Image (cartoon, helix red, strand yellow):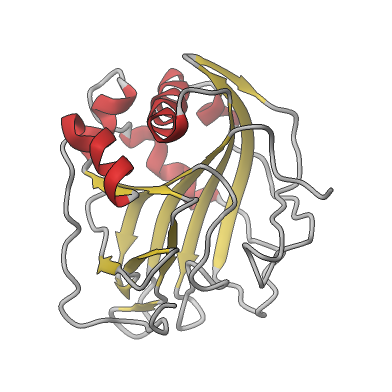
Amino acid sequence: MSPPSSPSTPASPAPPLTPLAELPARLAGAGWAVVDAATLATLAALAAGAPPARWAPLWNELPPDRHLLDGGRYRRRRHGCYVVEGDRVQAAPRRAHWQPVEYNALHGGIERWFDPLPPALEADADWSRLLAGLARAAGWLRGPARCFVEAHLFRIDTAGGIGRPTPEGAHRDGVDLVAVILVARHGVKGGETRVFDAAGPAGQRFTLAEPWSALLLDDERMIHETTPIQPLAAEAPGWRDTLVLTYRRGGFQGPA
């Protein structure tokens, strides 16, 4: 269904960018789109007209992911849950992140508890604007609805020589909309995004490089993965920071 992941692909192309006015049609037709930071800020009506630089240092404080089953120590993360309806954003009680095995062969079927999001982020008005703006994009797929949102702050580092943004491989998440927002890349090669049609062989590859650019996916129709990262220079630190937001109607995923 997909080519094997590799740490680096020569001449990985830049992503094709979609203007805001074309975004609903692009998601409906292709099932995915990439927007630049300015478009993301406009979609979310962020106060400064750009994603807040004040958020980026929060990724320096992420605790280790204690649930990696491949034996790696390359991932740090935090997790939070929300219910979004229109412009109303409500934090949900803390809960475990759970996926069925059919969507995550490596970590599916287990309850994974992660440290909560920083209070400074949750209290930021632009954070609520971002969650609500992307909920509107989720509504373009199958109509407006109350969205159950999970937010994940990830840092993948190369301290062990290699870091795997998607150790589960090419996958779906079992939601309606997935937004993968690149926050930063530092001292790494690889990290190529690959998007595939779940119903056929069509696919595309590219590398997100602009901070706060975002990949939006119709998760029902598309499969995605990101290839491993390696350090650009031996013994030099390297990392890739992302914010992943998933939108699902009907409720949060959980054990039956």
Foreground: 131 or 86? 86
Residue 42: x, y in percent? 24, 25
Is residue 198 visible in this depiction of the protein?
A: yes
Is residue 212 visible in this depiction of the protein?
A: no
Foreground: 211 or 87? 87
Foreground: 170 or 31? 31
Foreground: 198 or 42? 198
What residue lies at 41% left-to-right and 21% top-to-bottom? 129
What residue lies at 24% left-to-right and 37% top-to-bottom? 25
Q: Is residue 132 left or right of residue 28?
A: right
Residue furthest right as drawn: 256
What residue lies at 28% left-to-right and 46% top-to-bottom? 29
Residue furthest front as drawn: 199
Name the image quarter holding the N terminus. Answer: bottom left
How many circles with numbers are drawn on the protein? 0
Residue 114: x, y in percent? 70, 50
Residue 110: x, y in percent? 79, 60
Please tell me whether residue 23 is drawn above or below residue 12 in the rendered image.
Answer: above
Q: In this view, does 185 lie to the left or right of 217?
A: left
Residue 243: x, y in percent? 45, 47
Q: Is residue 213 left or right of residue 197?
A: left
**Which image quarter: residue 135?**
top left
What residue lies at 48% left-to-right and 76% top-to-bottom? 159
